[in-house]
Image (cartoon, helix red, strand yellow):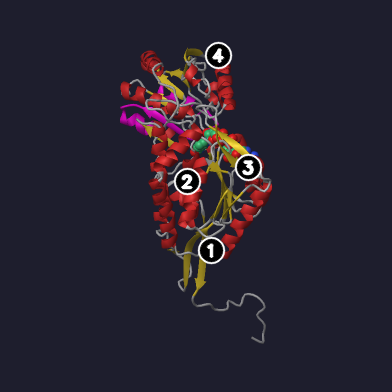
Amino acid sequence: MVFDKLFIDGVWRPAASGATRPTVNPATGETLAQVADAGREDALAAIAAARRAFDRGVWSDVPAPKRGAMVRRVGDLIEEHAEELARLETLDTGKTLEESRWDMADIAGIFRYFGGLADKEGGEVIASPNPDSTSLLVREPVGVCGQISPWNYPLLQAAWKMAPALAAGCAIVVKPSELTPLTTLRVTELAEEVGFPPGVFNTLTGPGDPVGAELAANPDVDLISFTGGIVTGKSIMRAAAGNVKKVALELGGKNPNIVFDDADFDVALDYALNAVFFHAGQICSAGARLMLQDGVHDAFVEALAERIRTIRLGNGLDEGTEMGPLISAAHRDKVEGYVAIAQKEGAKLVCGGSRPDDAALAGGFYYLPTLFTGCENAMRVVQEEVFGPVITVERFRTEEEAISRANSTIYGLSAGFWTRDPDRIARVSRKLRFGTVWVNDFNVYFTQAPWGGYKQSGLGRELGRIGLEEYQEVKHVYQNHAPKAVAWFGVTGGK
Ligand code: NAD
């Protein structure tokens, strides 16, 4: 596979330094491709190209129906190339092919949705205090946008940013994670086919620092949108303060999944597994923090352990694989570190807790699905984002206790709970402090519904109409139709 160039100002070119870096298949440890390794010079070139394109209006002045049609066309091309893209995503991330196929269908829909919104946003007339005037609100593109995406949903997370920004008329500089750049590069090729004017769509592959850091700090960037870890998110916010650029952050989560005694046991059990073991737990909304009410706790743990022991690990390309590897050796070290911490903190390991001893999996970064019980609120493994196939179980007695435990986190991305009691549904969904609350379900997100976090899980929202508005400024145009002098200042006798 050849993906050794950056896309800047409508042209594919190598990194200014000539450097490349490998991207690795986490299922085997083998190098998949050598990818251009951009540096600061490349970031400056891409930002300058986007700035020129935006300031000349080569995209924002294109009539909205045509802009929308071009964004929708990206979705069509993604659909046409869905199988190829899904395979690339699986090779680069390790997730199962089935999951990658869902992602591609979702992503095609995202481009269609935002392309469809592009010409639905007219101006809005608002009431004005002067009857001889018109007050108009117009939405305009925010300008040059830096867009930094993570490795767990490489193309999906990038699409949440690219599609609305392009639909709004912005110029973008996209930087995928250095661990998983392939699908973003392939979609850049597809976007080239669609024919966005040079400078409107730029893609840089390279490290967070300096490439992402430059996007966050550069005064020619009007908005920085970032999905990734909380520590990086905070550094982006600090860097963005230099020119008070707009900041959109989708950060981590520690997402409670609460099962009350009156829940549908079998369905809740099934979803408890889905909540945390999809993509080996490397999901910002993973329901890694399972909270079980007293009456159901013991039976649920027993049934959960039984199901966990049957999960089939393997290469995501292989038929029958249910869970793939972790993204890298370094990330597996991190997950192992948390397992050790949990044991030191007194959590009881029920199953997993090690690498698989299957020789066929030895080259990849696999880790067994892991279950801890006897977990307490204050434990690090309960409070911090492990981002791996590790589920912690806490026992609770009352609804109040469940709510207070669930909310006792710096994060606020998503939460789910299971009950048949309609009054409890109303009470608990109101009390949970999370950007998304699932009732009798988990990990459902779709293009029409906004996604984002309370508290330290982020700033702003992606998806839905609000996801387009993130890329728009609101301008108030006030026109006086009958201007008359008010003669407040400098009225003299000569007048
Ligand atoms: P990360 O913060 O390490 O990296 C994310 C991106 O930021 C990468 O492209 C990286 O190159 C770049 N980056 C690194 N240092 C940078 C810097 N100093 N300045 C600018 N950019 C920099 O995160 P990750 O490990 O790739 O992703 C995992 C994290 O993402 C998890 O915490 C997860 O919860 C979060 N996430 C959140 C959501 C959400 O919707 N809230 C979705 C997916 C992932």
Tell me if mark 2 has few (under 14), some (14-19) or many (20+) residues whose alpha carbon lies within 10 angstroms of its own.
Answer: many
The stretch in magenta equals 398-427
Question: Position of 460 compared to 490: left or right?
Answer: left
- Report the residue at 43% width, 41% height from top: 84
Q: Earlier in the sequence, mark 4 or mark 2?
A: 2
**Closer to the camera in the image, 404 or 234:** 234
- Report the residue at 48% width, 64% height from top: 62
Can residue 489 be seen in this snapshot? Answer: yes
Q: Which residue is mark 2?
A: 159
The numbered disc on residue 58 is 1
Q: Earlier in the sequence, mark 3 or mark 2?
A: 3
**Closer to the camera in the image, 233 or 10:** 10
Q: For marks 4 and 1, give the CA distance.
A: 58 Å
Look at the numbered disc 3 and give the secondary structure of its residue.
Answer: loop
The percent coordinates of residue 396 (x first, y second) are: 43, 19
Q: Earlier in the sequence, mark 3 or mark 1?
A: 3
- Report the residue at 40% width, 24% height from top: 273
Dividing the image into four quarters, tell me where ligand 1 lies: top right
Q: Which residue is mark 4?
A: 343
Asked whether the beta carbons under mark 3 and mark 1 sit within 8 Å of each other, the answer is: no
